[in-house]
Every structure is written in C-alpha cells, then in structure tokens.
Image (cartoon, rainbow, N blue to C red):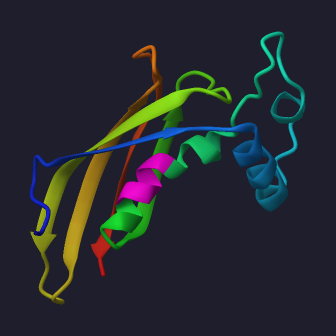
C-alpha cells in the first residue's frame, strides 16, 4: 500500500553500549562523552546514531534521500528508548515517473522529552 500525505509512521528503538561501540568504530566519532560513562554508567549516543531512526523509516519505504535536516535537542543515552514519528508532508508522482516525498519527524525519549526533530526529502525508488 503506497504512502499518502498525512500518514504517520512510528519506529522505536533502545540503544545499547554495543550500538555506541559499533557506531564509534564505523564513524570514527570518538568524543570522550561517547567513550566514558556518566555517573549513572551511561554513554551519550552519537547524534547521527540517533538520526538512524528516521533514516530507517525512509529505508523501509525505499526513499533515496536528497535532503536531510536534523536538530538535536537533548542528549540520548544508552538504555534510552527513542520513539520516532515520521509524518508524510508531500507525496507526489512526478513527470519522470518517480514519486517525490517530503517528510518531517520528531523523536522523543521514554520520558516524552523531544531529543531530535527535522525532515527529509527525496524520491521513492
């Protein structure tokens, strides 16, 4: 079933220490806050690791992104559960037989605090 304007797609994920270790290895983002636990034993998740939530939703729908905008609002820690809601803002068949898509997203932690918001646009493959 194709997407339509107004659709909301939700994805939820909890981040682990292993997630941070793997992302650190892949990205090279070795900020001390990603490597040293806080007083509660948590690591700060890399911002772009948090941003994999809306990109996962795009990937599920075969979106080839052209633009992505992220506003990081507060830190995400290992053990946090992040709920990401993606809202389809535009979904239109173009003359080149491609479908253009534009979406906004909002991610909140388990305490209903906003941690990330933004949007993306692209085409459906």
Return the x and y of residue 37 as percentages of the image width and height.
Answer: 85, 23
Q: Is residue 14 above or below residue 120?
A: above
Look at the image and give the residue range highlighted in magenta. 53-57
For the question of whether residue 98 can be seen, the reply is yes
Residue at 50% from the left image edge and 34% from the top image edge? 71
For the question of whether residue 116 can be seen, the reply is no
Residue at 14% from the left image edge and 79% from the top image edge? 94
Q: Is residue 110 above or below residue 31?
A: above
- Judge from the rendering whether residue 113 lies leftward or rightward of residue 38; answer left or right: left
- Judge from the rendering whether residue 113 lies leftward or rightward of residue 60; answer left or right: right
Residue at 10% from the left image edge and 46% from the top image edge? 6
Mark count: 0
Most common SS among magenta residues: helix
* Quadrant in which the C terminus is drawn: bottom left
Farthest-out residue, top: 39
Q: Which one is in front, 120 or 108?
A: 108
Return the x and y of residue 107 as percentages of the image width and height.
Answer: 41, 33
Residue 56 belongs to the span the image colors magenta: yes
Return the x and y of residue 80 as percentages of the image width and height.
Answer: 57, 26
Return the x and y of residue 33 as percentages of the image width and height.
Answer: 83, 28
Residue at 69% from the left image edge and 35% from the top image edge? 45
Q: Which one is in front, 120 or 78?
A: 78
Q: Is residue 61 above or below residue 94?
A: above
Name the quadrant containing residue 11. Answer: top left
* Quadrant in which the N terminus is drawn: bottom left
- Judge from the rendering whether residue 76 lies leftward or rightward of residue 107; answer left or right: right
């Amino acid at each position: 079933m194709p997407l339509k304007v107004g659709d909301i797609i939700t994805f939820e994920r909890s981040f682990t220490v292993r997630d941070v270790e793997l992302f650190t290895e892949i990205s090279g983002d070795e900020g001390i806050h990603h490597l040293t636990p806080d007083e509660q034993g948590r690591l700060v998740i890399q911002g772009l690791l948090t941003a994999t939530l809306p990109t996962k939703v795009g990937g599920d729908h075969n979106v080839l992104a052209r633009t992505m905008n992220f506003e990081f609002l507060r830190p995400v820690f290992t053990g946090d559960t992040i709920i990401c809601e993606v809202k389809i803002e535009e979904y239109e068949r173009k003359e080149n037989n491609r479908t253009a898509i534009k979406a906004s997203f909002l991610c909140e932690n388990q305490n209903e605090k906003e941690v990330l918001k933004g949007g993306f646009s692209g085409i459906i493959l």
